[in-house]
Image (cartoon, rainbow, N blue to C red):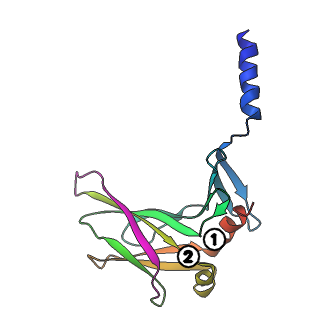
Amino acid sequence: MKLVFALAAAALVASSPVFAGKTAYTTSNGVIVDVNADDFAGRAEYSAPTIQLDGPVMGAALVAVIKKANVKGPLHVQGFAMYNGDWRYYTDAVFRGGEAVNFKRTNSNVGSCRRGCTLTEGFNFEISPEQLVKYNENGFVTIQVRSSKSSDHYLIRMPVAYFDAVREASQG
């Protein structure tokens, strides 16, 4: 009887129209996009592989699109920078040449304080398709994230292929 109940429960779950989970989608340019979908909530997140930050910080960024109720949001980049010492307040970013990026510092956290504190600052910004074309240098768009408290700036070098892949994956 327990076996029958277990099989019935498994069949019910398998046939359920409520899907929530993570899958991978390989795009036509070969980039693998992670898709986190929750059909019940009507939400899906599409993200390209992790991008490492370059400069006096450790951290990562993701190119992503979020779809809610089948309405696709803008291309955006979200991530974090982590460092030791005093707060740097990374509050602004620019493209090469000085055009401002719509950069937002989203959060800040204090980690371990054993030999100086480890500090983390989160961020998010949008990039338009026009900016991708304008600032594409050999397949990459690079921005400089600027500290308002020091000269410790860092770079985020993003493959344009990641933006193309996320757009493609989020079309369906």
At x 56%, y 73%, the residue is: 158
At x 61%, y 47%, the residue is: 41
Residue, disc 1:
163
Amino acid at circle 2: Ile
Going by the picture, which residue comes out furthest to the bottom? 97
Q: Quick one: quadrant of the C terminus?
A: bottom right
Mark 2 against mark 1, which lies toward the viewer?
2
Q: Range of the magenta residues?
A: 99-116
Say which quarter of the image contains residue 20: top right
Instruction: Please name whichever residue, 125 or 85, is drawn nearer the observer in this view of the structure.
Output: 125
Q: Where is residue 4 in the image (x, y as percent from the top left)?
A: 76, 14
Tell me if residue 115 is in the magenta stretch: yes
Cα distance, mark 2 to mark 1?
A: 9 Å
At x 44%, y 89%, the residue is: 98
Residue, disc 2:
127
The answer to whether 122 appears left or right of 114 in the picture is right
Amino acid at circle 1: Phe
Could you tell which of marks 2 and 1 lies nearer the N-terminus? 2
The answer to whether 3 appears left or right of 103 in the picture is right
Q: Where is residue 102 in the image (x, y as percent from the top left)?
A: 46, 77
**Number of the label disc, if any, that sits on residue 86:** none
